[in-house]
Image (cartoon, helix red, strand yellow):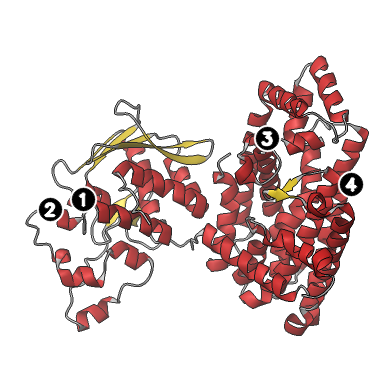
Amino acid sequence: MPAEPPLSAAALMVATIETLTRRAPAIVAAAGTELGTVRLVIHFGDGTRAALFCHGGLLVCEPTAESSAADVEAHFDDRSLLLLFDRSGLPAAESLEGSLDVRGTRLDVLAVWRTFRLLAQRASGLRAVQSLWLRYRMHAGIASATQTQPGSTDRRTTSTHWDLAHWPALDWLDQRHPAAQELIERGEPVLAPARSLWTGRKDASWQAAPSIFDNDLDESMAACKQLVVDEILRLVPNKRPRRDLYDLMRDYVQRPGKGLRPTLVIATCLALGGRIDDGVRAAAALEMFHNGFLVHDDIADESTHRRGLPTLHEAHGIGLAVNAGDAMHLFAVDMTLSNLATLGLARTLGLIHEILHMCRETVEGQAIELGWIRRNVVPRRDADYSLMSTKKTGWYTCISPCRIGAVAAGVTEPALLDRFNEAFRLIGIAFQIQDDILNLIGDTELYGKEALGDLLEGKRTVMMMHLFRSSPPEVVRRMTEINGTPRIGKPFAMAEEMLAAMHQAGSIAHGSALALELARKGVRRFERDLAFIPDNAGKGVLRQVANYVVTRAL
């Protein structure tokens, strides 16, 4: 296997922000809030440069030219760059002449300082970030920040210390560094005490542990999804008629997917004091319901692809697909009831109540949208879309998984369960709008559905509603004609024509802005409504999911 090419300092910073955007969006969202409208340009010791700024609510880092405009300019050599993650000293306190220079107004510099302080505290402990920085250090031949100073006699350059704490800040953040008393007993030097700094708001310590629990969202979702897939594959019968029923029930479950619903169920269960085993069976039942809905939705929408592969009815025929979808729903009920043995009667009845409510909301939302398509009408208000989206996907995508996870943990009080509703209603609508946008402009291989499939199906998205209320009468008449053309035989050119009209009317930009606004409101409601849950690993995952919609690149 060929070795990875060396990273430049600018590429390291770009890769760090990209990794955090994907794996820990709550950190990126918080850092973006600190940076605000400030544009930072960093000049590195190897001659490369990078710009850090916020765009559309997304923290962005990209290579830049030397003449790039900036509110704040900073120069870091390798020593200063690594001091960002060195626990025992502050970059400003230990910088050498020509090593670190920051220029800008006082308020803008403080905003940059707070941004990097937050990143250093909350991001450097993630394994994916450690891996990037270790790769950079190895290729650059740098052992530590202080060792880059020729002739240094700093006690931290001793081989004993670096064997013990390979990278002090990371070891400390990962809670693996030996306690000070253990070091004293072994005769090893103890790290210098933390120093404090003025942030422009209050006195704080660079080394102070953040009160928020951060997780790697990619790892968390993959782990939760795998737990649920394994549970389903273990429980689905391995008997006749295997080829025409049970293999079909396993099909969608094993296809690539984000695993959002299982993650929400298990994370909420853990956040409220439950065990993983308490939530896995309920999450598996919900996933079976979800996949059964997908099979039937694909038939109703005449979709050709799901998660990058032919839909079940395309591969096996409508009859077998309908039957498999029915079987998935029946099996999901059986899986829910099987929680009696482990969760008891009260919690199992609570799960049944939540799932019945979820199913009712879903079929009502589906009826609203199919009715619009049947009558070839397009509502004008975004509120109409929000109602339909909340019912059709919001409940079983975001709200119900959280409530089901809470019930699995033993929380059945309606007032506490309702605390999840508004935050995840807003997040769910934002997530659905973004999915609708991805169907219009996203990478088909990454999105996993037929390109422009929503337009071919006549799906009433918030972008279509904006198009109809923003366009002149002749355009509306033409778009109505396209929507009225049956899906079978509808030329792809018609979908492309509607997409062009959406671009012309600014409908996609409207959808993106609305999704971001809803997502930000959802995050604020998350922090306010769920403040009763102590910060722990489960709540940390929920926070990452909530912020994922804010930082999701379209």
> Residue at left 73%, top 83%?
342
Of 491 and 178, the residue lying toward us: 491
Q: Tell me which amino acid carries mark 3.
A: Leu
* Tag shown at residue 149: 2
Quarter occupied by residue 157: bottom left
Q: Are marks 2 and 1 in contact (CB under 8 Å)?
A: yes
Q: Disc 1 on helix, strand or loop?
A: helix
* Tag shown at residue 367: 4
The residues tagged by marks 2 and 1 sit, at their Cα atoms, a distance apart of: 8 Å
Q: Position of residue 433 (x, y in %)?
A: 69, 41
Q: Disc 2 on helix, strand or loop?
A: loop
Q: Earlier in the sequence, mark 3 or mark 1?
A: 1
Residue designated by label 1: 79
| Location of the N terminus (image quadrant) | bottom left
Q: Are marks 1 and 4 in contact (CB under 8 Å)?
A: no
* Tag shown at residue 440: 3
Q: Earlier in the sequence, mark 2 or mark 3?
A: 2
Q: Disc 3 on helix, strand or loop?
A: helix
Q: Position of residue 228 (x, y in %)?
A: 67, 68
Q: Position of residue 351 (x, y in %)?
A: 78, 70
The residues tagged by marks 1 and 4 sit, at their Cα atoms, a distance apart of: 62 Å
